[in-house]
């Protein structure tokens, strides 16, 4: 997919550039707990500044629903950005204005006022057809920033020409969020490994008892169909770590008794999944294998993260919780690509395109 690049903007000396970034960073008590998304935009910012442009950045933070909310103040982001990239102006949280999510033309007009060019480096938000993403490229010469371009190259490459075997590892709570991406992945992967809360709906479809584990009853039939179509390529847990009604934690096989709740894949499954991952030449991982925030249920996710780190193939982690997991286990540097986009990376794998990318391809300097 060909996107306009920074070089396609022409001379930028003395020009004013609007940069859409995704500085939607995790916060705790008003402090940034992981500044990856700010650091990830620095190559684009320095490129623009080195070429003489004045950079005005904009981002959303949280989901403040169109009205100013001090909980989602950009002050901590502004302070960190100032340390990392002095001289960049940062606009107010875009979602303090209802015009952002509505893609309101007046809001777009205010964003681009006085600007000569637009750069989108907000990969994590490229699946949102919001004003700051799809609006400016209707009017301004536009380009993908370095981060956005790299994300699209890596994730797009997984769909088009993955080295084989290609193993996708999916986890996380809900299978309903991932049906589309599962179907798309089954078109390209050799093996799909399923753990996390979503595995119980698959296990139920196989006739296992799931006790009090997470289960989406309305998805069982869909999972049964996926297993019928591609069951020989789908790997499910054969043992689990479960939490009992009295707080006991024990290993069980793939059936969970009433009153018990599956919280993590078991050690046998973790070993089997690791073997699949280590033997792969391409791995995509999205979603933890268990409730890894709780040390009692972190082993499955840790084992998978360690296998990913040992894998000699090309390894990609889709953002969100799995990115947080590799960071927490100190393994982020061992992975070839940690995406800054959670929802965006899944949607790109599923659809092969995103609203933010389509908008850039339609910009006046490309048309
Ligand atoms: C993210 O954190 O996934 C992106 O910043 C998008 O945020 P959103 O899901 O609130 O649109
Ligand atoms: Mg590797």
Image: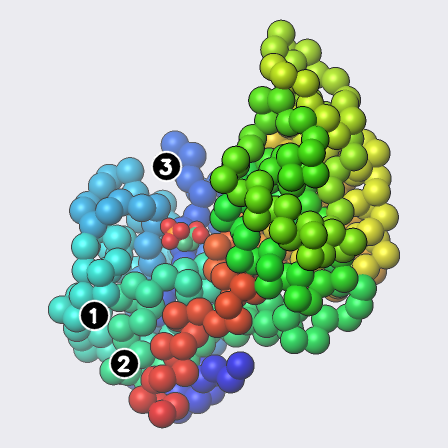
Disc 1 crowd, CA 10 A, few/some/many (<14, 14-19, 20+) = many
Q: Say which element carries label 2.
A: helix
Q: Quadrant of the C terminus?
A: bottom left
Residue at image coords 53%, 71% = 352
Please state if 288 lies on the left or on the right of 105 as rendered: right
- For marks 2 and 3, give the one nearer the viewer: 2
Asked if residue 14 can be seen in this view, the reply is: yes
Residue 187 placement: quadrant: bottom right
Q: CA distance from mark 2 to mark 1?
A: 10 Å
To which residue does mark 1 refer?
Answer: 108
48 vs 3, nearest the viewer: 3
Q: Secondary structure at mark 3?
A: loop
The answer to whether mark 2 and mark 1 are in CB contact below 8 A is yes
Task: Locate residue 67, reporting x and y percent.
Answer: 18, 47
The answer to whether any part of residue 341 appears in the image is: no
| Disc ID at residue 30 | 3
**The residue carrying mark 1 has its beta carbon less than 8 Å from ligand 1:** no
Front position in the image: 121 or 263:
263
Kindly identify which residue carries mark 2: 138
Question: x%, y% of residue 104?
Answer: 18, 66
Picture mark count? 3
């Amino acid at each position: 997919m060909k996107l306009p690049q920074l070089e396609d903007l022409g001379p930028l000396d003395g020009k004013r550039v609007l940069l859409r970034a995704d500085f939607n960073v995790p916060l705790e008590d008003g402090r940034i707990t992981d500044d990856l998304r700010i650091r990830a935009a620095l190559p684009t910012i320095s490129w623009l500044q080195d070429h003489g442009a004045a950079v005005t950045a904009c981002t959303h933070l949280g989901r403040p629903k169109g009205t100013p909310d001090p909980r989602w103040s950009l002050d901590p982001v502004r302070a960190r950005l100032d340390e990392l990239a002095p001289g960049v102006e940062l606009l107010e949280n875009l979602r303090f204005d209802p015009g952002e999510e509505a893609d309101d033309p007046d809001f777009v007009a205010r964003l681009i006022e006085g600007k000569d060019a637009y750069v989108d480096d907000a990969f994590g938000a490229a699946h949102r057809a919001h004003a700051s993403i799809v609006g400016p490229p209707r009017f301004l010469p536009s380009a993908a920033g370095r981060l956005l371009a790299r994300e699209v190259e890596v994730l797009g490459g997984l769909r088009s020409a993955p080295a084989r075997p290609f193993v996708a590892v999916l986890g996380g709570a809900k299978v309903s969020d991932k049906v589309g991406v599962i179907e798309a992945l089954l078109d390209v992967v050799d093996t799909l490994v399923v753990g996390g809360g979503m595995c119980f709906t698959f296990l139920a479809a196989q006739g296992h008892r799931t006790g009090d584990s997470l289960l989406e009853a309305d998805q069982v039939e869909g999972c049964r169909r996926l297993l019928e179509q591609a069951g020989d390529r789908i790997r499910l847990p054969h043992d689990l770590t479960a939490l009992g009604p009295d707080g006991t934690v024990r290993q069980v096989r793939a059936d969970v008794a009433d009153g018990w709740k599956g919280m993590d894949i078991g050690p046998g499954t973790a070993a089997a999944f690791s073997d699949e991952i280590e033997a792969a030449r391409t791995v995509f991982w999205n979603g933890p294998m268990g409730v890894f925030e709780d040390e009692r249920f972190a082993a499955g996710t840790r084992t998978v993260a360690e296998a990913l780190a040992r894998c000699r193939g090309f390894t990609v982690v889709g953002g969100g919780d799995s990115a947080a997991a590799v960071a927490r286990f100190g393994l982020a540097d061992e992975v070839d690509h940690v995406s800054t986009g959670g929802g965006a990376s899944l949607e790109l794998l599923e659809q092969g395109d995103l609203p933010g990318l389509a908008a850039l391809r339609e910009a006046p300097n490309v048309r």
